[in-house]
Image: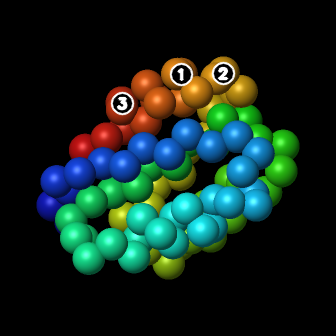
Amino acid sequence: MSDPVISVIIPAYNAQEHIRECLESVLAQSFRDFEIIVIDDGSDDDTGKIAARMALTDRRVVVDRIWNSGVSVARNRGMSLAR
């Protein structure tokens, strides 16, 4: 897969109630040349598991987990992973 034109970075902390809908919304866009980088910021719910399951069905979704460090650290981690 070539490098995507756009990287969408989604920092997520305890977002199990909304992460699936969030990812489905981004994936439903008509523009297809993008990647989604979900940074699970140390969630203690199923946020990471839900995102990881979605990554199995769409290779544009990448999931990374960090220790709870706050949204700025999570965003910067996403930037370091962006292609």
Q: Which residue is mark 2?
A: 69
Left or right: 39 as drawn, with respect to 37? right
Crowdedness near tag 3: few (<14), some (14–19) or many (≥20) residues, C-alpha within 10 Å:
few
Q: Residue at x 39, y 76 (%)?
A: 28
What residue is shown at x 76% (from left), y 61% (from top)? 17
Q: Return the residue nearer the eye: 79 or 28.
A: 28
Q: Position of residue 77 (x, y in %)?
A: 46, 29
Q: Quick one: SS at disc 3?
A: helix
Q: Which mark is residue 33?
A: none
Residue 14 sits in which quadrant?
A: top right
Question: Which residue position is annotated with label 1?
Answer: 73
**Amino acid carrying mark 1 in the image:** Val
Q: Residue at image x 70%, y 28%? A: 67
Alpha carbons under labels 1 and 3: distance apart = 11 Å
Determine whether label 1 and label 3 are within 8 Å by CB: no
- Residue 80 disc label: 3
Q: In the visual, does 45 lie left or right of 71?
A: right
Does the image show residue 65? yes
Q: Earlier in the sequence, mark 3 or mark 2?
A: 2
Q: Earlier in the sequence, mark 1 or mark 3?
A: 1
Q: In the picture, residue 53 is in which quadrant?
A: bottom right
Per the model, the C-alpha gap separating discs 2 and 1 is 6 Å
Residue at left offset 70%, top offset 40%: 13
Q: How far from the left and from the top, in percent, is residue 39?
A: 55, 42
Out of 29 and 34, give the one closest to the viewer: 29
